[in-house]
């Protein structure tokens, strides 16, 4: 009987050289994202067989970033052949589509819904034209919340449905970006006593699936309540920054993540000088700080962005200036 429990070191090195050669020749590429800092923190973009976890408070921008990552994946990687499976538990696919119209038209969600002036015929036609173009992209949506058994079954079925057999009768799976918005909305499965246990199962499932299939997971998560303690929102405190331990279920997800990102809007917490570096935020709620907490193939750091949530946009900006420190005499 052939061994299936281990492989020789020789096989691992042959696989590694084949992978390096594929990347060297451009046959294997990562998925570029809209932000250079994000690409640098990862392997020049979202790498297949990887998991990215993005944690933030509610209404901080994690769903917007997920949407921009998916939209940018198709716009910035036109030669790449992949699909997207989007587990949208927080909002309906209809709502996500309207958010995309808002970004494309540079207008607000409320306006498109005729809640801030009546949507013009011309803008409605622009929405229709955008939808026609977007339908060319192979994106599928799962709206109904499920437990971990169902989550895995859906992915296994999806990967099989979009696979094929090569001339050697080996099954070839389609590269797929899979997003989950967000992890806390997964239902508890049989034998899982609480959400923490569900997240442990999630982490193990993500690792098993990304090893088996060419998947790039993007998982959205909430933060622990400690992030809102008054001390952490005082100007110039190290606790202003998002930390690994702030990610809800960090112990369950951290070891399985290849890239762990924490998002913060310091101005929303009335912070004027952000963190021990004392970046001058001046309580500006449009500034978003993206903390790269764990980068398996990159360097941790902080990047800053300007957001316009009413128009569903986000642009990279230079780091804000730091408050000058006066020496006491």
Image: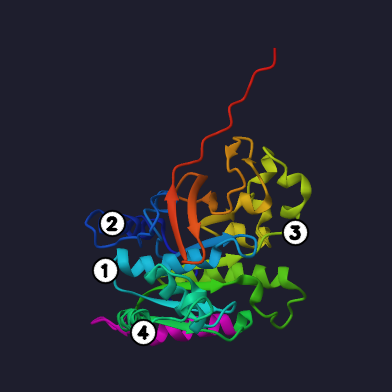
Q: Quadrant of the C terminus?
A: top right
Badge 2: residue crowd in 10 Å (few <14, some 14–19, many ≥20):
few
Examine the rendered structure and indicate whether residue 124 appears above or below residue 66: below
Whether the residues at callouts 4 and 3 have beta carbons within 8 Å, the answer is no
User: Which of pointers 4 and 3 lies earlier in the amino acid sequence?
Assistant: 4
User: Which of pointers 4 and 2 lies earlier in the amino acid sequence?
Assistant: 2
- Disc nearest the viewer among 2 and 1: 1
User: Which of pointers 3 and 1 lies earlier in the amino acid sequence?
Assistant: 1
* Rendered image coloring scheme: rainbow
The residue indicated by pointer 1 is 78
- Disc nearest the viewer among 4 and 3: 4
Residue visible at 24% across and 62% down? Answer: 27
Residue 233 in percent (x, y) is at: 71, 47
Badge 3: residue crowd in 10 Å (few <14, some 14–19, many ≥20):
few
Q: Secondary structure at mark 1?
A: loop
Residue 179 lies in magenta, yes or no? no
User: Which of pointers 2 and 1 lies earlier in the amino acid sequence?
Assistant: 2
The residue indicated by pointer 4 is 121
Residue 158 in percent (x, y) is at: 44, 84
Task: Identify which residue, 167 or 50, lies in the foreground.
Answer: 50
Whether the residues at callouts 2 and 1 have beta carbons within 8 Å, the answer is no
- Disc nearest the viewer among 2 and 3: 3
Q: CA distance from mark 4 to mark 2?
A: 47 Å
Q: CA distance from mark 3 to mark 1?
A: 41 Å
- Disc nearest the viewer among 4 and 1: 4
Residue 180 in percent (x, y) is at: 54, 73
The image quarter in which residue 31 lies:
bottom left
Give the magenta-colored segment's residue range: 150-171
Q: Is 26 left or right of 57, judged from the image as shown?
A: left
Q: CA distance from mark 2 to mark 3?
A: 42 Å
The residue indicated by pointer 2 is 23
Residue visible at 55% across and 84% down? Answer: 143
């Amino acid at each position: 009987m052939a061994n299936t429990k281990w492989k020789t070191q020789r096989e691992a090195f042959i696989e590694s050289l084949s992978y390096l050669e594929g990347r060297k020749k451009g046959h294997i590429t990562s998925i570029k994202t809209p932000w250079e800092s994000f690409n640098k923190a990862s392997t020049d973009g979202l790498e297949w067989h990887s998991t990215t976890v993005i944690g933030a408070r509610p209404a901080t921008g994690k769903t917007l970033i997920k949407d921009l990552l998916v939209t940018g994946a198709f716009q910035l990687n036109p030669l790449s052949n992949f699909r997207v499976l989007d587990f949208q538990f927080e909002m309906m696919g209809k709502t996500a589509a309207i958010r995309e119209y808002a970004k494309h038209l540079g207008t607000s969600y409320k306006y498109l819904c005729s809640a801030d002036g009546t949507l013009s015929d011309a803008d409605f036609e622009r929405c229709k034209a955008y939808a026609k173009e977007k339908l060319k992209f192979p994106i599928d949506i799962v709206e109904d919340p499920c437990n971990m058994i169902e989550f895995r079954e859906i992915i296994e079925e999806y990967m099989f449905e979009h696979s094929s057999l090569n001339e050697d009768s080996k099954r070839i799976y389609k590269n797929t970006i899979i997003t989950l918005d967000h992890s806390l909305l997964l239902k508890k499965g049989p034998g899982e006593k609480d959400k923490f246990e569900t997240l442990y199962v999630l982490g193990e499932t993500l690792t098993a699936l990304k090893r088996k299939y060419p998947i790039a997971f993007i998982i959205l998560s909430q933060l622990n309540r400690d992030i809102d303690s008054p001390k952490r929102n005082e100007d110039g405190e190290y606790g202003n920054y998002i930390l690994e331990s702030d990610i809800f279920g960090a112990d369950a997800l951290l070891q399985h993540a290849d890239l762990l990102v924490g998002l913060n809007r310091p101005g929303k917490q009335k912070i004027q000088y952000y963190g021990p570096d004392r970046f001058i935020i001046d309580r500006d709620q449009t500034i978003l700080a993206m903390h790269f907490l764990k980068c398996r193939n990159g360097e941790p750091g902080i990047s800053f962005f300007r957001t316009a949530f009413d128009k569903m946009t986000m642009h990279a900006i230079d780091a804000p200036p730091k408050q000058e420190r006066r020496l006491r005499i």
